[in-house]
Image: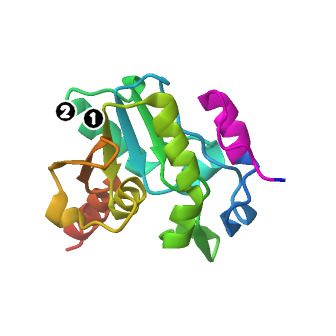
Amino acid sequence: ADEDLSPPDVAALWEQVESCRRCDLWEGATQGVAGVGPDDASLMIVGEQPGDKEDLAGEPFVGPAGKILDQVLEEAGLSRETSYVTNAVKHFKYEVRGKRRIHQNPSAGEIKACNVWLEREFELVQPKLVLCLGGSAARAVNGRPIKVGENRGRVLERADGLQFFITSHPSYILRVQQYEDVP
C-alpha cells in the first residue's frame, strides 16, 4: 500500500518515515531519524543524513558534528531549541569497516526517494529560511546539484519562494581539524 504523503502534523510524519521503504537504506539502519524542534520554527537546518550516533539515538546531530553545529549556532546567536533540525535522507547509509559503521554519501536516487519527507516538513513547519549543511542537503532542497563553494554564504530562492542558505557541513570542520592536528 502507498503511504499517505500528507500527514497532518510532524508527529504523524515521523510515524510514516519509520515505516518508509522508498529506498533500501532502511534495511541496514537501526531506525528512521526524525527531525526535531518547534513545528513553527523560522529556521530549518537540513543536514545530509543521520550518522552512526544519530542512527542509534534516533535524533539528528547528536554526534561530533552536532557538537560543532551547536558551537556555530551559539556563536551566531542562534539556538537549536528554536530551530527545526532534520536531514535530507532519513536513514543511515554506511559501510562496515571492522567493528565501525563508516558514513557513505547518499546517492541522488536516495536523496530523491526521501525528498517527499523533506518537502512535507517544509509544508508543515513553513520556515522563513533553510540552512543547508553540505552538498547533499543543498541538492535535496534545491532539487538539483549545486556547488557549495560557489554558493556558500548567499541566500538563494527556489521557484516556490523558499529561501535557503548553503554552508559546509559540520563534519567538514571535523575533518579539517583532524588534518591540522597531524604533525
Q: Amino acid at mark 1?
A: Leu
Q: Is 27 situated above or below 46?
A: below
Q: Amino acid at mark 2?
A: Ala
Task: Tell me the magenta residue range.
Answer: 2-17
Q: How is the model colour-coded?
A: rainbow
Residue 177 in percent (x, y) is at: 25, 61
- Looking at the image, residue 8 sits to the left or right of residue 3; the answer is left
Foreground residue among 86 and 16: 16
Task: Give the tally of numbered discs.
Answer: 2
Residue 50 visible in the picture: no
Which residue is located at x 69 percent, y 59 percent? 29
Which residue is located at x 51 percent, y 63 percent? 111
Q: Which mark is residue 73?
A: 1
Q: Are marks 2 and 1 in contact (CB under 8 Å)?
A: yes
Residue 96 in percent (x, y) is at: 63, 75
Residue 103 visible in the picture: yes
- Asked whether 34 falls inside the magenta stretch, the response is no
